Image (tube, rainbow, N blue to C red):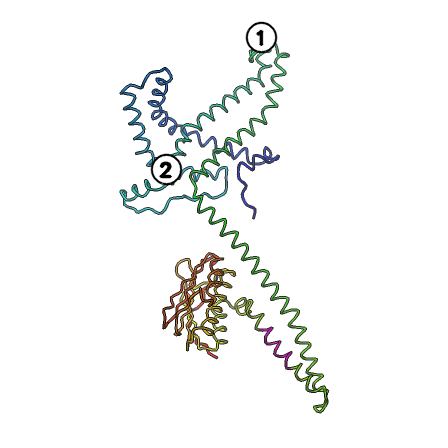
Amino acid sequence: MTTPEAPLRAVLNRRYLASAGPWRALVYVLTTLPIAAPVSAAMAVLVLPWLAALSRLIDGNLPTRTVFILMTVSLLLFTGLGPLAAVPLAMIERARLALIDPRPLPSAHAPAPQDPFRWVRTRYAETATWRELLYAAFLGLIVPAVYGTYALLVLFDVAFVLSPFFASTGTATWTFGAFTVHSAAEATPFAILGVLFAPVLAYLFGLIGAGQAATARALLGDRTGIALREVAQSRARLVDAFDLERRRIERDLHDGAQHRLTSLTLQLGMARLDVPEDSPAAGPLGQAHDQAKDLMVVLRDLIYGIRPQELTDLGLPAALRELAGRSPLPVAVTVADGVPRPAEQIEGTAYFAASEALANVVKHSGATRADILLARAGDVLVVEIRDDGQGGADPARGTGLTGLADRVAAVGGRLLVSSPAGGPTLLRVELPWRSPGLVLPAATTPGQA
């Protein structure tokens, strides 16, 4: 899936005129007219006293008392009532922006209470409201001036193109600056110039639409949120790349190194059977065979630690139960009702968090048992690991919590730890939900070595 292109960048494309860009700009500009017209009329009324004051200052006279009063009233109306009109206007403009720019533009407003007075107080205190008021001023003052100038250029170009037709009637002469046209032959160069200028007008029209869209995006959007989302997406792509690389290493170890080591172990075993026990080679051969078998166990655990097969085939609950069964401590795994299967990346992170947390429990806590809870809270996958150990877990002491928190944060989650001195310790991992799948049945399965 390709990322939608920004309108300004699309205009610079040499294939712009052959694309849908000019038509998008045409629709966007035409739908601007019924919106900008009343806004422009209101802005004109508010600006008139200031223009009158400026005119008197240019003439060397001070504004009259009446003009000062009108200036004050217009300013109060603009700052007092303007935001009430700018907020709904911004909602319309954000929705209408999709006509020329398919990229989403979220609002920068925070959720406001339903009470009208508290809503007004919240909105007037937000920077986003005053940026929307600035856009309303742009829509009422700058946009009409730009549109009017462009319309004048179009009229001139149409006059150039049609000048031979009108000149051929002989009813009137045409004057273009210092040039006077009396016949169709004299008007032909102007017609050619008008035809050549038409593509320039098309590009200029696209620039007008793109410039207005860029202004709307700059003033009406959640710029901080967009930047954070872009960082999060970049971070997620990096995590995906690491996950793919880990899966490749797992596959290479499983399909390559493990098979060759298994073959070597079998050959050593066969050779051990063929060598008499009193042979000088029997001892070293037996040691090599035993070491090969131990190495197979180490390699199997290494492959399992990358991504266990149960996690891929059966899902997170089954993998957690198997993890609990392999732990030297008694571990109970509880899966809450109605927990669907999350996205693969989230599932792998949840398993990694539980595995690292159990490893920390075994190494540092002095606990006699542990519990794992898997649940869903709204759009969040929750994994809780609790133990009855001595507590005092501190990331600064190198207990592995810092790396675990980084891994969880890489997919947009967070890690919460409660570990008072003397225990118990509760580690809670909250991960965003991505892709719901099959609903897993609730179960409580104790697993112990």
Q: Nearer the viewer, residue 395 or 417?
A: 395
- x, y percentage for residue 413? 45, 58
| CA neighbours of label 2 inside 10 A, class few (<14), some (14 to 19), many (20+) | many
Query: Height in image: 356 above or below 98?
Result: below
Residue at numbered disc 2: 130
Residue drawn at 48 percent across, 40 percent down: 98
Query: Height in image: 235 above or below 126?
Result: below
* Corner quadrant of residue 333: bottom left
Give the dominant element type of the magenta stretch: helix, strand or loop: helix
Residue type for callout 2: Trp
Residue type for callout 1: Gly
- Highlighted range, magenta: 290-300
* Corner quadrant of residue 176: top right
Q: CA distance from mark 1 to mark 2?
A: 58 Å
Q: Is residue 291 magenta?
A: yes
Tag nearer the camera, 1 or 2: 2
Residue at numbered disc 1: 170
Q: Secondary structure at mark 1?
A: loop
Q: Nearer the viewer, residue 449 or 159?
A: 449
Quick one: which residue is furthest to the bottom in this view? 278
- x, y percentage for residue 137? 39, 31
- x, y percentage for residue 134? 39, 34
Residue drawn at 36 percent across, 73 percent down: 422
Q: Is residue 414 left or right of residue 50?
A: right
Q: How many marks?
A: 2
Q: Is residue 126 magenta?
A: no
Query: Height in image: 300 above or below 287?
Result: above
Q: Earlier in the sequence, mark 1 or mark 2?
A: 2
Residue drawn at 53 percent across, 51 percent down: 234
